[in-house]
Image: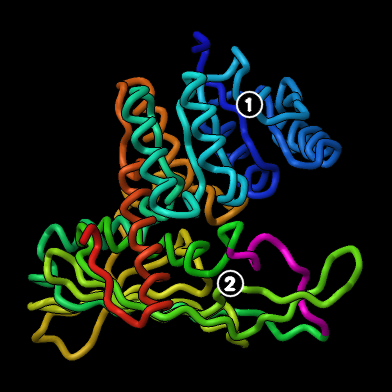
Amino acid sequence: MAEHGLRVGIIGVGFGTVVHVPGFTSEGWEVPAIWGRRTERAREKAEMLAGELGLAVTPEVPEDWRDLVNRDDIDAVAITTPPGPHLEMAREALNAGKHVLCEKPFALNASEAEEMRALAREKGLTAMVAHEFRFAPQRSQIKDLLEAGQIGTPELVSIELLMGRARPDSPPPYTWAADSAQGGGLLGALGSHYIDGLRHWFGDVAEVSGKLVTRLAERVDRESGAAMTADTDDTFSIRLMFESGVMATMTASSAVAPNQGARILITGSEGVLMATQGGPNPGPDGVVLAGAATDRQLLPLDVDARYTPISDDRDQRLAPFRLLLREFERGIREGVSPAPNFDDAFACQQVLDAVRESSATGQTVRIGG
């Protein structure tokens, strides 16, 4: 570990260069190297980032991600690729003695997720999953309100996420997100964030039922223009029963136009909490509405400054991501894996697998049973 600070290598130059590199450098980390599947594009990204962020040294771009993982001048690896190679990349990084921050969707299935968390435990390294929205103001405030008994005993949760863009004249290009073999689909891409948030609030899930649907399957090949078909979900409905007795339902679709945003409604024995957002992710200015069982309406609550310790208008995901990075750094320096860690990632993956099994069989699935 460098005396002046921590150093991270970034695998993936999509989301990795939009959020991870700006987030890490803003928190005082060095980024000696990044890697992308297309080397020339990754080099262009590295030069662009060096200029935009004022980096003293442009990140190097090895041709093989394994060369990045095994460098002596990095302490941690951030994995920001699609989920298909996450297991291999995390295994290589942990075996090289590197701490790991892995993007979601975490893995292709719970078996892979279990292998990743078991190896992290064996190596005693800090290993976290990038469910940064635990640190968004709305989500953090809801957590505190629930723990303070604002609505008594939580009983029922209803979530709607209905988003989409104006229908294009031609089908969108075929990407990994349209391929189930690569871990694509709305359930993993955004449903995983909400499932993690629910687990953060209410604990472990006991049973799951759900249905996955593809409403808009038409795609085209980027290069040839040939027609292709997505086999991943763009719409889902799930029901989660928690060990605590809370029941949560979620209906989501990325095929709704015009976009309707999201609504989270939490009812309890003594009142109701509600949070809304204009898009798929909670914004920095989101508020929580609350009402006691004796009230006639919900009213907005004040947002304490402790929920917004960072202001970063470059991307609405950056402020919560940077708060997650502070926990990642604390974990490295204290020799622990703060939440959301690989245990949380495994538990979330179990729920994702259970939804897929329920959708295929029509049966309710017990977690761990």
Viewer-nearest of discs 1 and 2:
2
Q: Which residue is label 2 attached to?
A: 232
Is any atom of residue 110 visible in this view? yes
Taking the view exactly as shown, the residue that stands out farthest to the bottom is 296
* Closer to us: 325 or 192: 192
Residue drawn 58% across the image and 41% down it: 20
Tag 1, which secondary structure? strand
Classify residue 49 as left or right of residue 368: right
* Closer to us: 160 or 173: 173
Is any atom of residue 290 visible in this view? no
| Residue 190 percent across, percent down from the top left | 49, 65
Residues rendered magenta in the picture: 170-180
Residue drawn 55% across the image and 75% down it: 233
Q: Which residue is label 1 attached to?
A: 31
| Residue 160 percent across, percent down from the top left | 41, 80
Q: Residues within 10 Å of mark 1 (few under 14, many from 20)?
A: many
- The secondary structure that dominates the magenta segment is loop
Mark 2: amino acid = Thr
Query: What colouring does the structure picture have?
Result: rainbow
| Residue 188 percent across, percent down from the top left | 49, 62
**Relative to 330, does residue 136 appear above or below in the rendering?**
below
Tag 2, which secondary structure? loop
In the rendered structure, find residue 124 and report the number of the disc placed on it. none
**Relative to 334, does residue 281 appear above or below in the rendering?**
below
Mark 1: amino acid = Val
Residue drawn 30% across the image and 79% down it: 363
Q: Quadrant of residue 147?
A: bottom left
Q: Quadrant of the C terminus?
A: bottom left
